[in-house]
Amino acid sequence: MLKVVVLVSGGGTNLQAIIDGVAAGTIKNVEIAGVISNNYGVKSLERAEKASIPAFCISPKDFDTREEFNNALLDRIDSLSADLVVLAGFLVRIPEAMVKKYSNRIINIHPSLIPSFCGVGYYGLKVHEKALERGVKVTGATVHFVNEGMDEGPIIAQKAVEVLEGDTPEVLQRRVMEQAEWILLPKAIDDFANGRLTVSDGKVLHKN
């Protein structure tokens, strides 16, 4: 049974998609060992508790230095015996030590078709605001492994979503979640847990 630790910052809709997938059996051989948020009082922690998943808040505000926060985050992940770390709307830069220790074992969901609208400053609603400002006709989501760069790790899967006339950032965000994020992330976890994903020379190989 693969132990997954999910890192979150806000509402936790992607977390809910994972919880639902495990419960429904569409994500097989996976146990959600814990949920960690960098913010107190967010709905994602409620979702975890409702599903009887250990939930923790590790906030940078509780530490004097970023290094202390990074160490506390890594210690908690280690204590949960994580086999896979999933960033499901986690708006904190991952410590380099964690990237090295969990190389090719951290995956992230990003609400655009990388390399478009990604990197520093592109997160949450800002991604959709920029997509609409640019006037793109198609956007989507990308699930990828995490490396030292920002949104630069090997791509696991992408799914396109149409941009419609009159879309607001909020409407587009919801459509990208429903049509791409909540599909891609659970499938990537299931594929990883069941040996269908490997990384070679910086590229993801899929097995049937």
Image (cartoon, rainbow, N blue to C red):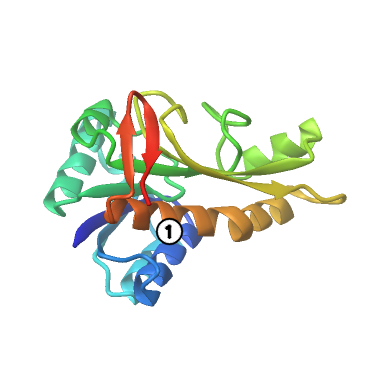
Name, please, the residue furthest toward the front: 208
Q: Residue at x 28, y 55 (%)?
A: 193
Residue 192 or residue 53, whichever sits in front: 192
* Quadrant of the snapshot with the N terminus: bottom left
Q: In the rendering, at what x and y percent does residue 180 appear?
A: 58, 53
Q: How many marks?
A: 1
Kindly identify the residue that appears in the image at 39 percent across and 76 percent down.
24
When the figure is inspected, residue 8 is found, relative to residue 202, above or below; the finding is: below
Q: Amino acid at mark 1?
A: Pro
| 171 displayed left or right of 56 | right
Q: Please provide percent x and percent y for residue 70.
A: 24, 35
Q: What residue lies at 45% left-to-right and 53% top-to-bottom?
A: 185
Residue 5 seen: no
Q: Residues within 10 Å of mark 1 (few under 14, many from 20)?
A: many
x and y, in percent, of residue 122 in the image? 57, 33
- Is residue 2 shown left or right of residue 60? left
> Between residues 55 and 41, which one lies in front from this camera angle?
55
Q: Quadrant of residue 121?
A: top right
Could one spot residue 82 in this view of the protein?
yes
Specify whether 5 is left or right of 20.
left
Q: Which residue is mark 1?
A: 186
